[in-house]
Image (cartoon, grey):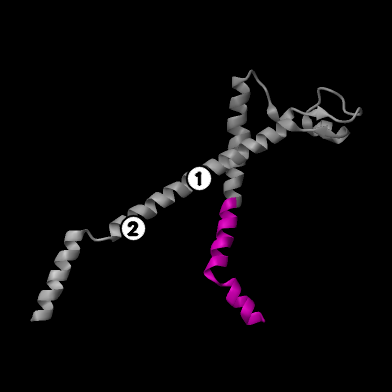
């Protein structure tokens, strides 16, 4: 059983998946910072200083109005729709960037396929050469 597990764990797909998860986590942290530290403050500046992360609806009478979202959560139940907007924007950016990366990789793969194929005249000349070599 240990040998079988070792064979599974060292298979190329598992290692590739592990690398992908680590890179994905790091990429997620970068995109989260981009959204929270660059995009949302810019959106806030454009919309007159709005901070979406502090938008919420109190669901409990214990929550005082005008508090920051984190403080309001400590006092009682709140519906944090501003935080949801930030996370949804984060997801859209990650999805779009991954789309661009995969699209670029697919274009590179197509270019490589085109480069690997010999033009028709080169194939014909190769066949002629091989026929002449066979006659000798």
Predominant SS along the magenta part? helix
Q: Which residue is mark 2?
A: 113
Q: Position of residue 87 (x, y in %)?
A: 66, 38
Q: Secondary structure at mark 2?
A: helix
Sequence order check: which comes first, mark 2 or mark 1?
1
Left or right of 61: which side holds 85?
Answer: left
Residue 7 located within the stretch drawn in magenta: yes
Q: Is residue 124 above or below residue 136?
A: above
Q: Is residue 110 above or below residue 37?
A: below
Q: Position of residue 129 (x, y in %)?
A: 13, 71
Question: Residue at position x 19%, y 64% from top?
Answer: 123
Residue 35 located within the stretch drawn in magenta: no
Q: Which residue is mark 1?
A: 99
Range of residues picked out in magenta: 1-24
Q: Position of residue 64 (x, y in %)?
A: 87, 25
Question: Residue at position x 57%, y 66% from top?
Answer: 14
């Amino acid at each position: 059983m240990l040998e079988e597990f070792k064979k599974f764990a060292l298979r190329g797909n598992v290692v590739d998946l592990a690398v992908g998860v680590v890179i994905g986590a790091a990429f997620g942290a970068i995109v989260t910072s981009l959204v929270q530290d660059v995009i949302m403050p810019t959106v806030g500046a454009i919309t007159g200083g709005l901070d979406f992360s502090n938008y919420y609806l109190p669901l409990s009478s214990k929550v005082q109005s005008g508090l920051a979202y984190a403080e309001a959560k400590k006092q009682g139940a709140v519906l944090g729709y501003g935080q949801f907007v930030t996370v949804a924007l984060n997801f859209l950016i990650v999805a779009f960037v991954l789309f661009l990366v995969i699209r670029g990789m697919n274009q590179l793969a197509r270019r490589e396929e085109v480069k690997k194929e010999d033009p028709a005249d080169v194939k014909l000349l190769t066949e002629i050469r091989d026929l002449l070599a066979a006659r000798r």
